[in-house]
Image (cartoon, helix red, strand yellow):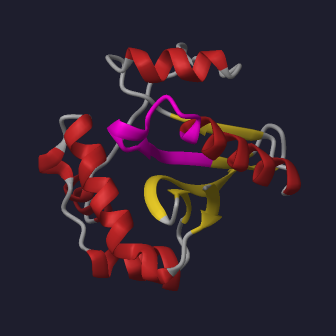
Amino acid sequence: MFQIRKATPQDTPVIFDLIKKLAVYEKLEKDVVTTVEELQENIFTRKFAEVLMAEENGKSVGFALYFYNFSTFIGKPGIYLEDLFVEHEYRGKGYGKKLLIALAQIAHEKNCGRLEWSVLDWNTPAIDFYKSLGAKSMEEWTVFRLDEGGISALSEKY
């Protein structure tokens, strides 16, 4: 049996494991510096993000981690999908699509104006999948980032 459900604090070790598997897939293992405890604190106590779990027969096989943002131009909240991941052996069964549908339903219920995410430019299977669902590439935009060191340096500059 397949289901999508909101994650609970008890799911944190599973979420952490799926994050590590996502990092391997994206060739970014070295970038995973968080801990189960930090995820627990920031997702379930401080509520900076929310997580949907995809399950098959009670086994977690994927997740979608998201948070709310706000568009000044449309004057509405939006959802930013930080990560969507389905374990390799469960891909092609509709889990990713069901996770995105569930997020779209949440966005619709909350009167969000946007549902957005980023994808690595080499990840052709994901790009093709997203396009098949009607998503559009924002090619005229460039993503910028300050990491923790950059945040610290900028915050201490003035």
The quadrant of the picture occupied by the N terminus is bottom right
Q: Which of 71 and 136 is in front in this view?
A: 136
Residue 35 appears left or right of 10: left
Residue 65 appears left or right of 85: right
Tell me where the magenta segment starts and ends, as one range: 80-95
Q: Nearer the viewer, residue 29 or 137?
A: 29
Please report the residue visible at 25 percent of the width from the left and 63 percent of the height from the top.
152
Please report the residue visible at 66 percent of the width from the left and 49 percent of the height from the top.
79
Up/down of 70 relative to 8, above or below = above
Q: Nearer the viewer, residue 144 or 81?
A: 81
Image coords of residue 133 (percent x, y): 68, 22
Residue 84 lies in the magenta-colored region: yes
Is residue 154 visible in the rendered image? The answer is: no
The quadrant of the picture occupied by the C terminus is bottom left
Is residue 63 visible in the rendered image? The answer is: yes
Residue 10 lies in the magenta-colored region: no
Image coords of residue 40 (percent x, y): 40, 80
